Image: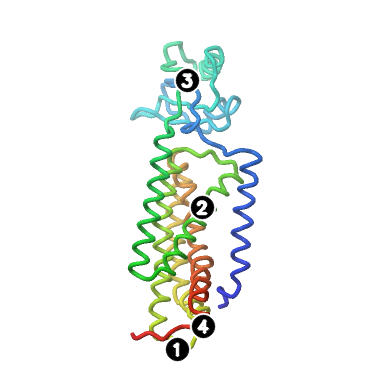
Amino acid sequence: MNIVQNRKIWFSVSGIIIILGLVLGIIRGVNLGIDFTGGTLMEIKLHKYVPTEEIREITDEYDKNSNINMLGTDKTTIQIRMNEDFDNEERKEIFEEFKAKYDLVEEDLLRADQFGPSVGKEIQGKALLAIGISIVCMLIYIAFRFELSFAISAIIALTHDILIVLAMYSILRVPINSPFVAAILTILGYSINDTIVIFDRIRENLKFAKKTDYMKVANESISQSLSRSINTSLTTLVTILALYILGVEQIREFALPLIIGVIAGTYSSIFIASPLWTMVKQRQKGGKIIARKA
């Protein structure tokens, strides 16, 4: 299996996705959700449970990216959050459609006003700080537990995963809301775990390597860990896909970046991190392994 030798192919695939997402993000702008932008909030008592898809038949006329939550134990009250700042007349017009369709009265409009972004600059700053601290701590731990070449490769692979998720959101025009921040932190933990498994195998194989280049050791280690990595990722994806398909809208907002992140993390652990490690090692020692004692 010549995964490392074909690293230009794997790097190119990732580069195309990231650059495409960046270009589209610059041209079209990042699709920030209502948690970041604020907008209009309405709460309406329907007196019965109504599927989200049916509610969207009305709300999509005004905002296709609106967020719909079911309130109460019986789920008979809906909360609608829309990106647009609708004035009083427009909010009344929206309620009139619900009123006519579900035979409501004026008192069933529990709330109708504008709201500011729930994810302010302070929370965004703390989220970035948390990601930065996580990456630095991982860098220190891997450098101490393995060696610096492994740490550098792992952190670059983690950065790759974050960029891939952001690029896919830009390409698909998916709104970025607060669950996205939590999902990114989850992806970092999952991806580094998969990478460490392969790196641990590389370290074990290095103990017995004699006059063998790093590419061969990396390829053998990937082959030995490949089925384990793919099977673990598939079982994780099945669970997340079930959440995405069967879960409510808030769960889907959390599950979607996880799906993209798990795929990107598995890809980077196999096709990005290990080739990067060989490149770092070859720069350090001219491409040959120094034999180590077991």
Going by the numbered disc 2, the residue's amino acid type is: Ile
Numbered disc in front, either 3 or 4: 4
Dot 4 lies on which element?
loop
Circle count:
4
Circle number at residue 257: none
How far apart, in angstroms, are the residues tagged by discs 3 and 2?
33 Å
Q: Which residue is label 1 attached to?
A: 210
Of residues 231 and 115, the one nearer the viewer is 115
Of label 1 and label 2, which has the lower sequence position?
A: 1
CA–CA distance between discs 3 and 4? 63 Å
Q: Earlier in the sequence, mark 3 or mark 2?
A: 3
Which of the marked residues, 3 or 1, is nearer the chain's N terminus? 3
Residue of label 2: 260
Q: Is residue 155 above or below residue 119?
A: below
Query: Looking at the image, which is closer to me, 46 or 38?
Result: 38
The kind of residue on which mark 4 rests is Asp
Alpha-carbon neighbours of circle 2 within 10 Å: few (<14), some, or many (≥20)?
some
Q: In the rendered image, which quarter contains the C terminus? A: bottom left
Q: What secondary structure is found at the residue carrying circle 1?
A: loop
Q: Position of residue 196 (x, y in %)?
A: 40, 67
